[in-house]
Image (cartoon, rainbow, N blue to C red):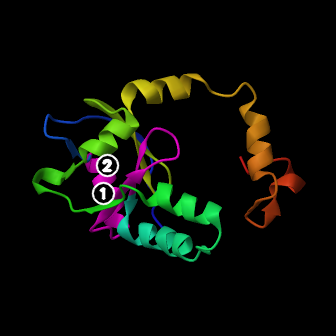
Amino acid sequence: MSQLLGEFECKIDSKGRLRIPSGLLTLLSNMNATKVVLNRGFEKCLNLYPKDVWDDVADKIGSLNDFVKQNREFKRYFLRGATEIDLLGNDRILLQKRLLEYAGIGKDVILAGQGNRIEIWSKEDYDKLMENEPEDFSAIGEAVMGDIHFGGVSTSDSGGPPQ
């Protein structure tokens, strides 16, 4: 399966339209993504999901028990503002004003591929986030990826992912 990868500096026009870079359009096309869903991210960013990926996420969220308060709250906050959008002419998407305000996005943005989705950040916030790289990124990698198997070999058995 294709992955959405790379970092792209872009601009939003005065009407809230964003031109998707050709590299990301190609990746979306390889994923047969004819529609996308825009949503709030957990941090102050926006997420752009290919429609079929969003459908999988929405199905999982829809299966949460509504009789549990925490589930209802999660669903409410996660799904608010989620919008299915089509590419406009010239490979552009229209970003809703409310979502732009939530993410503090002005004119300059960074699109960051995150595998199955694209994060959309204000350039300033993204640069600040990337400047705060953890001191021991290696320890985080081990904690998160330590028990995942690569090519039949556990990372905990081999001391890490293959080189």
Magenta segment: 21-48
- Residue 43 in the magenta stretch? The answer is yes
- Residue 56 in the magenta stretch? The answer is no
Which one is nearer the viewer's eye here, 41 or 66? 66
Determine the residue positioned at 78% across, 67% down: 152
Secondary structure beneath disc 1? helix
Position of residue 110 relative to residue 84, above or below, is above
> Residue 48: which numbered mark, if any?
none
Q: Name the residue under label 1.
A: 26
Left or right of 71? Residue 85 is: left
Question: How far is the residue under mark 2 from the one under mark 1?
Answer: 5 Å
Position of residue 36 relative to residue 43, above or below, is below
Q: Can residue 108 be seen in this view?
A: yes
Residue lying at the far right of the rendered structure: 157
Q: Can residue 116 be seen in this view?
A: no
**Residue 4 locus on image (x, y percent):** 43, 54
